[in-house]
Amino acid sequence: MAYEKFELELPLKCGVTLPAFLTYKTLGDPKNPAVMIPTCYTGRIAATMNAFIGDDDAVSPKKYFVIVVGLLGGSESSSPSNQPAPFDGANFPKTIYEDNIHAQFKLMKHLGVDKLFCYMGYSMGGQQAYHFATLYPDHVQKIIPLASSAQTSGFNWNFLEGVKSTLKASSDFMANTYTEPVIVGTTAFGRVYSNWALSYEWFKTKAWEAAGYKSSEEYLLSDWEKRLNTWDARDLLQMAVTWQEGDIAIYHDNDYAKALGAIKAEALVMPSRTDQYFRWEESVEEVKYLKKGTLAIIETVWGHIAGGGVGTAEDNVFINKTISEFFAK
């Protein structure tokens, strides 16, 4: 599938000006209301499109102008693995959500869009939705954070420290001097990460069987170890740091309630009941402070990843129906 590239000089929060590029895909008529969907952790553009976009889905290119954009560090937009010197590899500078949102806003303007009908995203994509609504409150009508939060909790932050350490401790990471794929590290990373992304209930009910696998081992080998082997270790670390620093409160005197209360956009907040690190209880708190917030909990055993469209068919029907109703309001 062919993607487009938007090049820009991007002043980063860390003080570096990066000759950056955003890789993106548009679908639908630019005259229609615009919906922006960013990628998330270990989620590329194609997977994001498969999860949320379809002619018969709530996000239909027949109704909307859909912009799917790659996260900085996510292997398709500017990342350690693809950035030319002098910012290649281990020299790639730190990027945070704010950097992504400013770049995405410039892309939006480049495409002739002044105000988004909706900014929606899963996991890190949902955190970007909160940040967009905070940094550009007059340029988005609705937001949909799926399995996400406005602020990365301490528990969430420490979970990420654990999986980061798995990569850094691997023999082939070589203290960040590697020149070949970090297969030992990404294999271990995928196995450790999987337990957090799923749930106790997923294993207890043998949910892999409904997904077409003969055993949990077969599923974990296919969907976690082998899939994570396609990722560059530095890209994984880059995105993890961005995730860890997610917090819209920093734009409102570190006042979490004040930051949520300042959001003008209508918000549909959709946590997963069994998400272990973006806890549904956090979403309940967020909706208390949002001026126009609606809570819809995904009742699933598929943990965090249910929010990304890879849970059961029933999960996906619920997500799609709820988004359709929210769009129609």
Image (cartoon, grey):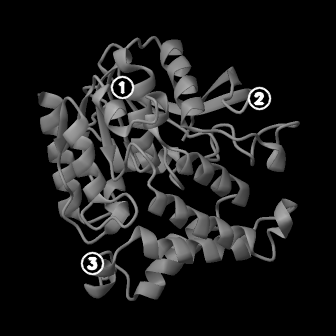
Within-10-Å neighbours for mark 1: few <14, some 14–19, many 20+: some
Name the N-terminal-most of marks 1 and 2.
Answer: 2
Indicate the quadrant where residue 139 lies: top left
Q: Is residue 60 above or below residue 104?
A: below
Q: Earlier in the sequence, mark 2 or mark 3?
A: 2
Residue that badge 2 annotates: 16
Tell me where residue 212 appears, x and y as whole percent.
Answer: 33, 78
Q: Which residue is mark 1?
A: 28
| Residue at 30%, 83% in the rendered image | 209
Total numbered circles: 3
Kind of element beneath mark 2: loop
Q: Position of residue 144 (x, y in %)?
A: 29, 38
Q: Which residue is mark 3?
A: 210
Q: What is the secondary structure assignment of the residue under circle 3?
A: loop
Look at the picture and state if 284 lies above or below 35.
below
Q: Earlier in the sequence, mark 3 or mark 1?
A: 1
Q: Quadrant of residue 10?
A: top right
Question: What's the amino acid at mark 1?
Answer: Gly
Which x, y percent locates residue 91? 83, 44
What is the crowding at mark 3: few (fewer than 14 residues within 10 Å), some, or many (at least 20)?
few
Element at label 1: loop
Q: Is residue 215 above or below residue 144?
A: below
State the CA–CA distance, disc 3 to disc 1: 34 Å
Badge 2 local density, few (<14 within 10 Å), some, or many (20+)?
Answer: few
Query: Residue at left 26%, top 38%?
Result: 55
The quadrant the N terminus occupies is top right
